[in-house]
Image (cartoon, rainbow, N blue to C red):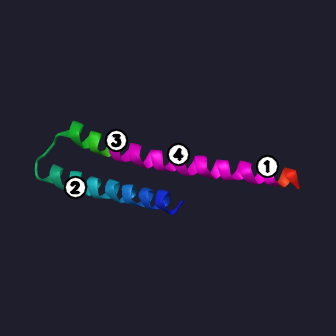
Amino acid sequence: MFEVYFGLLIFLGYMVYDTQEIIERAHHGDMDYIKHALTLFTDFVAVLVRVLIIMLKNAGDKSEDKKKRKRR
């Protein structure tokens, strides 16, 4: 489970870094907004996938706990 949370943290860092890079490039005249939007979109998708994995694992753990309690 540590790897999933660590991956989420890494991709959140990528999102912050890419946002800063986009801002710097815009200040220097690079106004390719489609490329910038795609960069942020790929970062967002990676974060969303990690969050979904975390939610699915937590839901699976809760259902296993309920099954164990019913057996007792």
Q: What separation in Å lies between label 1 and label 2 (alpha carbons)?
A: 49 Å
Three-letter code, disc 1: Lys
Q: What separation in Å lies between label 1 and label 3 (alpha carbons)?
A: 39 Å
Q: Nearer the viewer, residue 19 or 10?
A: 10
Say left or right for 43 vs 66: left
Residue holding disc 3 = 41
* Horizontal and vertical percent position of residue 9: 42, 60
Q: Residue at x 23, y 36 (%)?
A: 34
Is the Cβ of the residue at disc 4 closer than 8 Å to that at disc 3? no
Q: What separation in Å lies between label 3 and label 2 (alpha carbons)?
A: 15 Å
Image quadrant where one finds the C terminus? bottom right
Residue holding disc 1 = 67
Dot 1 or dot 3: first in sequence order is: 3
Three-letter code, disc 4: Leu
Query: Magenta region, mostly helix, strand or loop?
Result: helix
Q: Quadrant of residue 14?
A: bottom left
Residue holding disc 2 = 21
* Horizontal and vertical percent position of residue 59: 65, 48
Residue holding disc 4 = 52
* Horizontal and vertical percent position of residue 42: 33, 43
Magenta-tinted stretch: 41-68
Q: What separation in Å lies between label 4 and label 3 (alpha carbons)?
A: 16 Å
